[in-house]
Structures are given as structure tokens and as C-alpha cells.
Amino acid sequence: MPRLDMETQQKTAVPQEQILVSLVIPTRNESQNIVPLLKRLGAALSADIDPHAVEVLFVDDSTDNTPEAVAQAAADFPFAVRLIARPPERRNGLSGAVVEGFGAAQGTWLCVMDADLQHPPELVPALLARAVEARADIVIGSRKCDFFGPLGLSRKRAMTSQLLTLLARAWFPRLLRNVSDPLTGLFLVQRAAVDTAVLRPNGFKILLEILIRCPGLRVSEIFFDFASRHQGESKADFQEGMNFFRHLLRLRLTANQSFPRLVLVALLSLVMDTAAFALGQQSVNLPYWATAFIAAQLVLLLRFFLTEKWVLGGGHPVPGWPSLRRFWVTNQFSLLLVRLPLLILLISAWNWSPVSAILLAVLVESVARYTISEQWVFSRRGMTMWQPGIYRYNLHGILRIESQTPLPELAYFHVAEPLLHVDIQIRVDRFGTPTPQPGAILYNERLSRFGFGLVVLPGDNFSEIVISPLLGAAPFALYKSVVEPVLRWALVQRGYVMVYGASVAQKNVATLIVPEGDEGKTEAVLQATRQGEYAFMSDDFAILAGNGRLYSFPKPITVTAPLLRHSSGGGSGKHGSLWLQNLLYWRLGRRIGLQLSQRGWPVATLNILWQRLWLPPKWPIQAVQPDVRLADTADLKEVVLLVEGSGAMTAVPAAKVIQFVVQRQQAVEGFPPYKLLLEQLEDANKIPLAEKEQAIITQALQSCTGWSLGKQNRFQWSTFYDRKEKCSGGHAGVQCG
């Protein structure tokens, strides 16, 4: 068969409007992998995607019989298989092949993958599903990694990839912050989101080119196991490494037009700082450190105005005095903490000449200041691609959560096996604070990886939460401030509500206990479960369906010393530590924190640091009540309202029960950004959360029996039904047992 050196269609193409996904596969001497790749792809598509809505486009630079292998295999598959066999004069590397494939592809979505089967074809349906669910512009297949780099590579290649990733992040820390593996070769991108005219492909790393030249893409990720090469040889070598470095330099100089000017200002500042210090030494009779300080202030002002007017062209987001104030404060820190101490060390301790010492001190300070201003690029975890574990939680089949940080509050729902579908994904941005993406909700206390930061990308069937490393290390704060409001919103979308209150079940009949404040409900459910007739369902929230079905939510209980004394778990020797823990988490401190947050204090970050020093006093129910029984679900038939005072148990009309429960529901508020997330989730999807929750609660409780009891009365479950029998009815909507 003659060699094909022009584009050849091996099968009748599906009309362009019917093509959903175009797989663009660059090849060079991959003849042995063509058939295995197409077979695995066909098997993967058959169950999830109509094969006729898919085309496979090989862009080939081979010197072997790869084109012939494509031609022979094409007729055996239900999807269109096309080939672009490029002549030598058009061969400009893998990235160039991908861009040429983009121009010839017909699909709405463009999927790039290698032909060597290290990228599993089975992942294509998952990439497409994630793109639709997350409303993403691009979905990246991120290779799982350890300390040395991507798994599946040799140690040498893994460490090389690690170093190249570090270099790319150092030069583009903000543009690459939402991506854990910017050098992967597996990704799916929406055709309309990429302007191929701005791409300048060179070398292997086309994803990096797209992320830098097409900023503002809404990004999602799927982690996969990078397989060993099936057949053929790797094309990566020293020359490709040099191409990558040149490509990175070209990107840095052209993607940001102000960067060359910024470099010139930095060099000019270095010269001016040194000259001003030398001139001051000769003209003013002051200690050298004082001269260095004064010279730095003068050059600082000049550098600010050059940066503001020439580098940024007056386009600083906070122009004028506030910008100057921030600029001045930042530079004072670097001056006092880096430049002056180093200058004193060099001159006083090591006897350097003043001019040499100031030159080195200014240079070191400039590097340190750049590093800090670029969001801690070289911090300990920022230098690695360490891959966190995956924790999965299945909430009664209603919601499924996948998280890179453990969530002790959801430990009851933990499952080991992979989830068939994920509704909420929690991902740790290992390199800093997450940055805004189109349609995303951002909360950032501006402390980078050492503070509270998150991005929520809400969707109808899938939502993604990207969090800062510090937040990922504080799972209780993560759950209460972030996950819980997202769960409330996601459940309402599905016709459920996280209803506030403790609950128990007896013979498939559930009782919900709702306190007027925050106290009394835990003691009530512990008394019920201690008698053995009732099974535990929840202490804080439960999941309620509109048809009145209640689902358990057994989070860890906030334990106090008095509560522990009355439990069957004993707790000898723990009362002192519990007293201290409860003192540290006193409700007054929470109220003060909420007030400070309204004044702009980084209260959420302080809360994380506090929890890392002293964990909240939260125990699983089994630790408090070892012989407790648990119930997954039951029909809600009774609601007990714990009110202030010492009133006896009385029947309550259904309308009053609903009003009471709804008011308590709306009063629940956690630490920032709890309330903000609820408000912005409503705005993002036009879902009136409070109204929807009220509608579900009203529907579920309209036929429930309602009771009111003063908190000061000891809640005796043994006489509960006796009191119901003695209850005199007469209230509309009330059922007396």
C-alpha cells in the first residue's frame, strides 16, 4: 500500500453537526498500538456514547507503517477513523500535530491522548461526563503521583517531569494554580473555548500552551493511573527537554506582554539601589544600615510609579493610594526581614565591601519578594506533586462525595469501592490558594496556601470544591464551613432537605427532636438509645424527603463532661480534658468570631489554626454509647419541640410545628463562609434555598404528630407514650396516640 502523505478519510465521516467528540491522537511510529487502542476505545464507547457521534483522528509523523495500520483497522469499527499523514516539511512536533488535528476535527469536544496506551481509552466517557456535569471548558486527566513524580514513569523520567512542572509553576504560578498536572497529555477541551489562532505549538506539552494562551478556562480534573508503555519507544529525550525550556521561555515573554518590562524595572531597581547606597555612603555620615534603609525608600517610590504607569499602563486593579500603601508595606517586610539582616551579616560579620554586599542583598531580597508575591511557589508541598488519597462517601445513594481529604463528619458513609458516579468532588490545590474560574464562587482570605481559600464550581449534577492546603488539613472546619452548606444546596436540588434536629427510630417510626436553641437534643437522644428501644439516627442534622421519609446522618457528637457522665460510655479520666476543650470552643468565642468576620478579619483562617492546635470535642456515637443501635431510615411521624422553660408535654398543631422547624432551619449558621456560600449558591443556580427547604419540610411534616416540652424537664422516654395517651386533643391537625 502506498504511503499516505496527505489527509485521507478512511471511512465516511459523520456529518459535522452529529460529531460529539473528536479524539485527536498524534502518532509517530506507533503501528503496533493502533489496533489495541481502537479495540479498547470501541469497548469503552459502546456502553456510554453513541459510536457514530465519535471520530478518531490520527495525526501522523511516522517513518514506519503506522498509516497502513490505521487504514487496515478503520473498517472494523463503528466510529469514523481519519488520518492526517504529514509530510516531513509539516512535522513540527507533538504539539503542532495536535493543533493541526484541532483544525481538521469536527467534534464539539476535542480529546487529546497518546497512542501508546499509557492514557487509558476507557477514560474518554468519564472525561465527557465530567465536562458536562461540571460545565467545564477543559477536563484534565491528571496522573497520580508520589513524591518523585508521576507514577508509571521510570524514576528518571518521573523526576524530570517533576522538575519541569516546578519550573512551569515558578514562571506561571497564577495561571497554573488550578491544575495539578499541567504537563499531562490527556485532556478534553471544548472546541469553542480554544482559539487555535493564538497557539504557538512547540515540543510535547500542548496542554501547557493552551492553559497559558487561553486563560480563564473553567477547569476540572479526573485522576487516573498512568499505565506502562504497551509497545514502541518513548519519544522523550534531552532534545525534547531543551525544546520545553525554550518553549517555556517563549511563553513567559509573549503570553504576558508586561513581563519583559517588569524584568527591566527589576534590573533598573538593582542598579539604582546599589548606586543610591554608594552615593549615600559618600555624602551622608550615617551608619551603613541607615543609609541602605533611606536609599531603599527612595528607590521604592520610583519603582512603584514605573510599575504602575509603564509596566501595568495604569491598569492596576487598585490604583492610587491604596495600591501604593500595599506596595510599600510589602516591601518594608522584605527590606527589614531579608535585605538589612543579610547586609549586616555580609559587612559586619564577613567583612564584605559595602557595594558588593548591597548588590547581593538587593538581589536576594528581590528573589525572596518575587517568591512570596507569587503565592509561595517554592514552599515545601509546592515543590512536589504528591498525590493525596481518595476518600469516598455515599449518603444513602442520594449524594456521592469524593474527597482528597478525609471528612470525619461523614465517616459513617465511607465506602472503599470506587463510586459509579460522583456528585461532589473535593480537591486540594497543592500549590496555593485556588483562583477564580468562570461561574465559580471564590472565598479567599488572601493568605495563600497558609490561609482559608476555596473555589466552588456548582453544577446541576456535579459540583467541584477546590480548597487551599491549610483548609485541607482542618477537616472539621472544612465540613462545617464549606461542605455542609454545599450539601444543603445539593440535597434541595434533589428534593431533600438537611433538617436541623436530633432523631431516633423505633420500629420504622422516626421521632425528630428540634430545640429552640442548640441545647437539649443530644441528651434526649442519648436517653432514648440507652434504654435500647430506640435506634440512633442523628444528633445535629438528618436528611428528610418530601414524602416524610427520614434518613440518618450520624455525625460525631459534640461531647461535654456532663453529657459523658450520663452516657453508658463512662469516660473516666476524660472529664478534665473535655472541660478544657469545651472552654476553648465556648459559644461566646463563636459569636465574637462571627462579629470579627463582619469587620474583615481572617476569622476562617484563625478558626483553622485553632482547630489544628486543639481538636473540637467530637466523638462518634459508639464512643459515647458503646451499645447503641443505628437505623438508616424510617418514616417521620413525631416531632418534639424543646422550648425554653419547664412546661409539661403538650400537643402542638402541625402548622406551629412546621413554623418552628423552619425558623430553626433558617437560624443555623456556621463560621464564614457558611452564609456567603448559601447566598451565592442560590444566585449561581437561581434556586431559592430557604423557600425550597420550607416547601419540603411543610410537605413532610403536615401529617406528623407534634409535641412541645420545656427544656428544664428531664425528657423521660419511658413515659413518652403514657403522656401522649393522656394528652387531650382538640388542636387542629394534631394526632394524639
Image (tube, grey):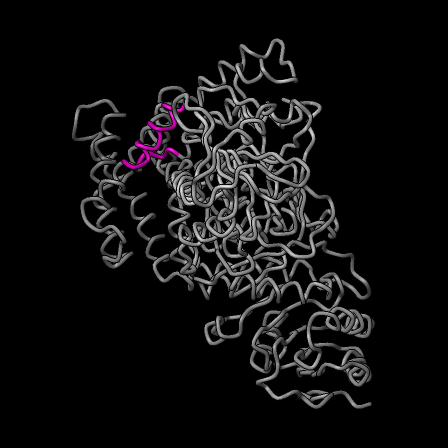
Foreground pick, 534 / 120: 534
Total numbered labels: 0
Foreground pick, 593 / 340: 593
Position above or below: 537 against 53: above
- Percent across and percent down for residue 530 are 65, 22
* Location of the C terminus (image quadrant): top right
Please name the predominant secondary structure of the magenta segment in the image. Answer: helix
- Position of residue 310 in the picture relative to residue 184 (left or right): left
Position above or below: 420 against 632: below
Q: Residue at x 73, y 88 (%)?
A: 11
- Percent across and percent down for residue 499 are 50, 42
- Position of residue 8 in the picture relative to residue 188 (left or right): right
- Percent across and percent down for residue 552 are 61, 40
Foreground pick, 655 / 345: 655
Chain part drawn in magenta: 587-603
Foreground pick, 375 / 486: 486
Asked if residue 37 can be seen in this view, the reply is yes
Q: Residue at x 59, y 42 (%)?
A: 384
